[in-house]
Amino acid sequence: MIAENTQTQMRKGILEYCVLLIISRGEIYASDIIAELKQAKLLVVEGTLYPLLTRLKNNGLLAYNWVESTSGPPRKYYVLTDDGRQILKQLDMTWQELVYAITTSQRGAKQSDSQHSN
């Protein structure tokens, strides 16, 4: 139960970052974002994604364009704003710091284990 809660919090923590990374590659439709997240084994439903996209848009990190569709109503395609690109750069740096912290912690734990077994 404790591990499950921690795993959920870890996934929530990186969801926004992953969404910004996906959108940074170019205009994208919400269902395509969900498909990419699922492919990355970060399962997200529309009820989670749409409020996140709205919050990111309201914070000035995303914009959207309506594009006519041949198979139904117009579709909303999301893009990063200049502010969104700046935030993504900051998140990239934070991610690198976290990777370093985890890698260093893992190495330290392994070195400590080998020292105690000698």
Image (spheres, rainbow, N blue to C red):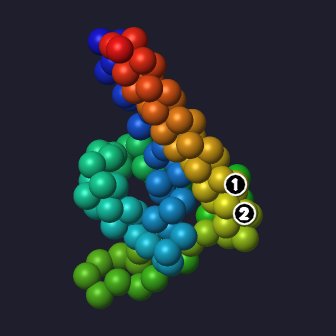
In the image, residue 60 lies at what x, y percent?
71, 59
Residue at (61, 69) in percent of width and height: 80
* Quadrant containing the N terminus in the rendered view: top left
In the image, residue 19 lies at what x, y percent?
48, 56
Residue identified by numbered label 1: 90
* Quadrant containing the C terminus in the rendered view: top left
Q: Given this view, does label 1 or label 2 mark the residue nearer the observer?
A: 1
Q: Residues within 10 Å of mark 1 (few under 14, many from 20)?
A: few
* CB contact under 8 Å: marks 1 and 2: yes
Toward the viewer: 20 or 57?
20
Residue identified by numbered label 2: 86
Amino acid carrying label 1: it is Gln
In the image, residue 95 lies at what x, y percent?
57, 48
Determine the CA span between mark 1 and mark 2.
Answer: 6 Å
In the image, residue 34 lies at what x, y percent?
33, 57
Q: Residues within 10 Å of mark 2 (few under 14, many from 20)?
A: few
Residue at (62, 44) in percent of width and height: 97
Q: Secondary structure at mark 1?
A: helix
Is residue 24 visible in this depiction of the protein?
yes
Q: Is residue 36 rendered to the left or right of residue 87?
A: left
Is residue 51 visible in this depiction of the protein?
no
Q: Does residue 5 lie above or below 54 as drawn?
A: above
Q: Does residue 70 lie above or below 98 as drawn?
A: below
Residue at (41, 85) in percent of width and height: 68
Q: Does residue 87 lie above or below 117 as drawn?
A: below
Toward the viewer: 9 or 56?
9
